[in-house]
């Protein structure tokens, strides 16, 4: 069965510090991968998606970036965090048949 | 802009009642529809998917799709306090990305 991991689970970072969030998927190959952000009490905002290694599409211009160095690894980064980057960051994977998305446990980021 | 709309709630129902959650979508090309349950502080969990007009039942859950009306619903029978959560509706058009609704908060009162 497929499993998706995210770490860290929680993170408190000062404004201006860098960020690296990691997501890995097990039990599937060549998944579509997604990064979402959910602000407190809000809906899901798609940040990035990837259909393959090195292929990244950005949905929202911001100070965040994403990379996919391996088939089942997806990384979200920032060089300098802003207060507005606080939120719940969710990684998701989808197969290429049913297109259902499955979410990881998420990382709760607080920028202080 | 493609949108999925949901009543934000909260929708309050007594324990044992039927909870009815509704969703409309703007993209007529959407082919697949999904319902997710999100407990407070947790990530969304897929509970139902529906691809064809009509009803699809899974245990206490029934998803209903009407593509002509661009309308999707989720019925939860015999609602339990453990069903209290936010329910997200999502629409998918092949080759594009999921569009999520803002979610409806459901509260099942004991």
Image: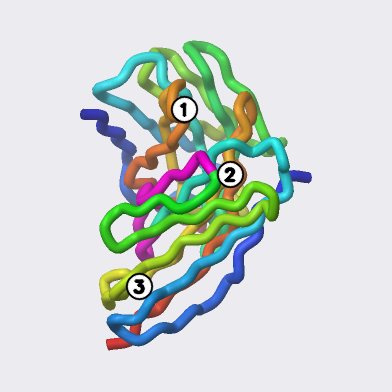
Q: Is any atom of residue A11 visible in this view?
A: no
Q: Are marks 1 and 2 on the same chain?
A: no
Cα distance in 3D space between marks 3 and 2: 23 Å
Counting other residues with Cα less than 10 Å from the Cα at mark 1, is it few (<14), some (14-19), or many (20 or more)?
many
Protein chain holding label 1:
A
| For residue B18, above or below residue A14 | below
The total of numbered circles placed on residues is: 3
Q: Nearer the viewer, residue B67 or A112?
A: B67
Indicate which disc residue B91 carries: 2
Question: Residue A31 appears at what percent x and percent y?
Answer: 41, 21
In the image, A51: left or right of A8?
right
Mark found first going from the N terminus, 3 or 2:
3
Q: Quadrant of the N terminus of chain B?
A: top right
Q: Which segment did they paint magenta?
A: B38-52
Cα distance in 3D space between marks 1 and 2: 17 Å
Counting other residues with Cα less than 10 Å from the Cα at mark 2, is it few (<14), some (14-19), or many (20 or more)?
many
In the image, A96: left or right of B6?
left
In the image, B77: left or right of B35?
left
In this view, the residue farthest toward the front is B54
Q: Say which residue appears at 32% left-offset and 39% top-offset.
A: A7
Q: Which quarter of the picture shows residue B82?
A: bottom left
Q: Which residue is mark 3?
A: B84
SS of the residue under disc 2: strand
Q: Are marks 3 and 2 on the same chain?
A: yes
Q: Say which residue appears at 55% left-offset and 34% top-offset.
A: A78
Q: Which residue is mark 1?
A: A33
Q: Say which residue appears at 47% left-offset and 24% top-offset.
A: A32
Q: Quadrant of the C terminus of chain B?
A: bottom left
Q: Are marks 1 and 3 on the same chain?
A: no
Question: Residue A94 appears at what percent x and percent y?
Answer: 43, 29
Q: Is residue B40 magenta?
A: yes
């Amino acid at each position: 069965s497929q499993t998706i991991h995210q770490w860290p689970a929680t993170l408190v970072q000062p404004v201006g510090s860098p960020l690296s969030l990691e997501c890995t998927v097990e039990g599937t190959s060549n998944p579509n991968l997604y990064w979402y952000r959910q602000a407190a009490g809000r809906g899901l905002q798609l940040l990035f998606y990837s259909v393959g290694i090195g292929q990244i599409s950005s949905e929202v211009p911001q100070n965040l970036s994403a990379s996919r160095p391996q088939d089942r690894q997806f990384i979200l980064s920032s060089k300098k965090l802003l207060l507005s980057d606080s939120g719940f960051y969710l990684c998701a994977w989808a197969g290429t048949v049913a297109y259902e998305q499955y979410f990881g446990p998420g990382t709760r980021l607080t920028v202080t | 802009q493609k949108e999925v709309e949901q009543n934000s709630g909260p929708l309050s129902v007594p324990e044992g009642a039927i909870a009815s959650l509704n969703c409309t979508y703007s993209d007529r090309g959407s082919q697949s529809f999904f319902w997710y349950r999100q407990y407070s502080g947790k990530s969304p969990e897929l509970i139902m998917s529906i691809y064809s007009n009509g009803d699809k039942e899974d245990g206490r859950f029934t998803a209903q799709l009407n593509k002509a009306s661009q309308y999707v619903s989720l019925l939860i029978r015999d609602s339990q306090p453990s069903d209290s959560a936010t329910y997200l509706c999502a629409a998918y058009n092949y080759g594009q990305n999921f569009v999520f609704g803002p979610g409806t908060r459901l509260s099942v009162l004991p």
